[in-house]
Image: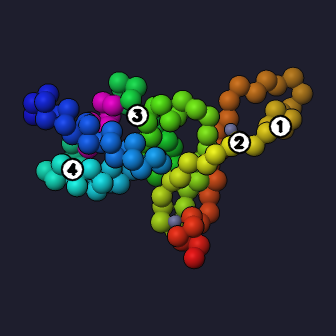
Amino acid sequence: MTERRDTAQQRAIREVCQSTSRPLSIDEILRLAQSDVPSLGQRTVYRIVRRMVEDGLLVPVAVSGQPDRYELAEIAASHHHHFHCTVCDRMFDVDGCVGKLASLLPRGFTLEDHELTLRGRCKSCSD
Ligand SMILES: [Zn+2]
Ligand SMILES: [Zn+2]
């Protein structure tokens, strides 16, 4: 496996993440990137995604009881939350944030960060 081929594959994966603009599973990345790089296999996607995480280009998004999804670090850098569709299993970005979370804390506690995943049915699964 040459560096140059890796780069083309990494570029395909990066473009998929950019154009989809929602957190993707390895299988989703594989399926979408295969239209650019038909020879792409699941193990290659795993390896490249893992390296892109190490290089700080992708950030894992945890889904309880499931393998991580991945989003671009530049998207992860701006505070946002996710919606997980319980029917099609896709994750979406959600704009905005709930306020006043610090008011839930016991007295004397300090809030530093929070994660929030909304669950339900996306638009196409609600119709
Ligand atoms: Zn759905
Ligand atoms: Zn928030």
- Marks 1/3 in contact by CB < 8 Å: the verdict is no
Total numbered labels: 4
47 in the magenta segment? yes
Which disc, if any, is residue 36? 4
Residue 64 visible in the picture: no
Q: Which residues are magenta?
A: 45-52
* Amino acid on which disc 1 is placed: Lys
Q: CA distance from mark 2 to mark 3?
A: 22 Å
**Residue 103 percent coordinates (x, y):** 86, 35
18 sits left or right of 30 in the view: right
Q: Is residue 95 magenta?
A: no
What crowding class fits label 1: few (fewer than 14 Cα within 10 Å), some (14-19), or many (20 or more)? few
Seen in the image, is 5 located left or right of residue 103? left
- Which tag is nearer the camera, tag 1 or tag 4? 4
Q: Earlier in the sequence, mark 2 or mark 4?
A: 4
Q: Residue 118, how many percent across, how many down? A: 64, 53
Q: Residue at x 52, y 34 (%)?
A: 76
Residue where numbered disc 3 is placed: 58
- The amino acid type found where label 2 is placed reads Cys
Name the residue carrying label 2: 97
Q: Could you tell me if the residues under marks 3 and 4 are in contact, i.e. CB atoms within 8 Å?
A: no
